[in-house]
Image: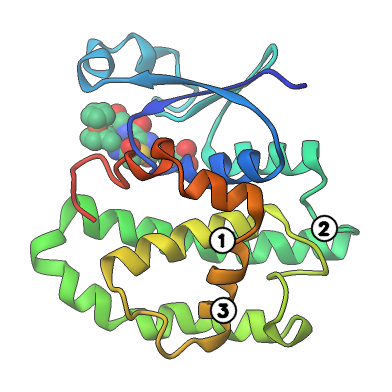
């Protein structure tokens, strides 16, 4: 069993997709929770490869950058497609998820009061891209790429679930994505994690906005 450890703030943020992946794959991990005060002391920031968290340990290997961590877990658990072409397509979708995550975080942390309404108005277009991509694989009845779940499904699911909290009807024009969220969320081990206090009681974002 690998020795996984997440060092991060007490938020879902950039770690919930990797937590969902590990829970669904039956992997165990430790959590080292960093408080605001601990972070402001500066030692952790100084040690971090890019001055930021999350940090992730797999035995003696220490990693930074949440998407690199997701990819590392994907390689460990066979979640990176069945051939190089699928891996490339998974990367493409993941870059699209990252674009949405960055826009979402900018709105949440920098422009919530003034920016939320316009952000929500643009969601039909933003999320419509994923609806069409999903439709192009097995008529939208499975996963984003190929026949099996991959790391991008966990990352996309996390972003979609956060958007459903922000705007509960944001998937009303996306029937395939709506069904995908329900289908993937109901995988038994993932459902158990999503129903757990560890997930439910952890704030989505560090400033209390959602
Ligand atoms: C913030 O942006 O949690 N890391 C964040 N912030 C602290 O000094 N490209 C990489 C990646 O994918 C992005 C990392 C990410 O891994 S995530 C970080 O390290 C810094 O830059 C969002 C999050 N925010 C919680 C938070 C940060 C500042 C205010 C609220 C924690 C609580 C208080 C201070 C630190 Fe706080």
Which quadrant of the view contains residue 60? Answer: top right
User: How many C-alpha atoms fall within 10 Å of the one at disc 3: few (<14), some, or many (≥20)?
Assistant: some
Residue 185's label in the rendered image is 1
Crowdedness near tag 1: few (<14), some (14–19) or many (≥20) residues, C-alpha within 10 Å: many
Viewer-side residue, 126 vs 76:
76
User: Where does label 2 land, which residue?
Assistant: 81
Identity of the residue drawn at 17% across and 53% down: 110
Numbered circle sitting on residue 88: none
Q: Point out the image quarter for the N terminus.
A: top right
Q: Count every numbered label the image shows and give the total.
A: 3
Nearer mark to the viewer, of 2 and 1: 1
Name the residue located 66 percent from the left edge and 65 percent from the top edge: 92
Structural crowding at the residue carrying mark 2, measured as other residues with C-alpha within 10 Å and reported as few (<14), some (14–19) or many (≥20) = many
Measured from the top left, where is residue 21 in percent x and y?
A: 63, 45
Return the disc, 2 or 3, that comes first in the chain's sequence.
2
Q: Which residue is mark 3?
A: 179
Q: What secondary structure is marked by label 3?
A: helix
The residue mark sitting in front, 2 or 3, is 3
Report how far apart the C-alphas of labels 2 and 3 lie in the structure.
Answer: 22 Å
Residues at marks 2 and 3 touching, judged by CB atoms closer than 8 Å: no
Q: Nearer the viewer, residue 5 or 103?
A: 5
The residue nearer to you, when weighing 37 against 52, is 37
């Amino acid at each position: 069993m690998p020795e996984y450890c997440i060092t991060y703030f007490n938020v879902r943020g950039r770690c919930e997709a990797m937590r969902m992946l590990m829970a669904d794959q039956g992997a165990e991990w430790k959590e080292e929770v960093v408080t605001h005060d601990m972070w402001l002391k500066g030692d952790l920031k100084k040690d971090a490869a890019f001055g930021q968290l999350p940090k992730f340990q797999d035995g003696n290997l220490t990693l930074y950058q949440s998407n690199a961590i997701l990819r590392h877990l994907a390689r460990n658990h066979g979640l990176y497609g069945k051939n190089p072409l699928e891996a490339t397509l998974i990367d493409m979708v993941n870059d699209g998820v990252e674009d949405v995550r960055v826009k979402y975080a900018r709105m949440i942390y920098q422009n919530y009061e003034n920016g939320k309404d316009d952000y929500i108005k643009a969601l039909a277009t933003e999320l419509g891209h994923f609806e069409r991509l999903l439709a192009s694989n097995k008529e939208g009845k499975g996963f984003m790429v190929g026949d099996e779940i991959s790391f991008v499904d966990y990352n996309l699911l996390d972003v979609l679930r956060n958007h459903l909290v922000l705007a509960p009807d944001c998937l009303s024009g996306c029937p395939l994505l709506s069904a995908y969220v329900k289908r993937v969320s109901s995988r038994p081990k993932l459902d158990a994690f999503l129903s757990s206090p560890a997930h439910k009681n952890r704030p989505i974002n560090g400033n209390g906005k959602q």
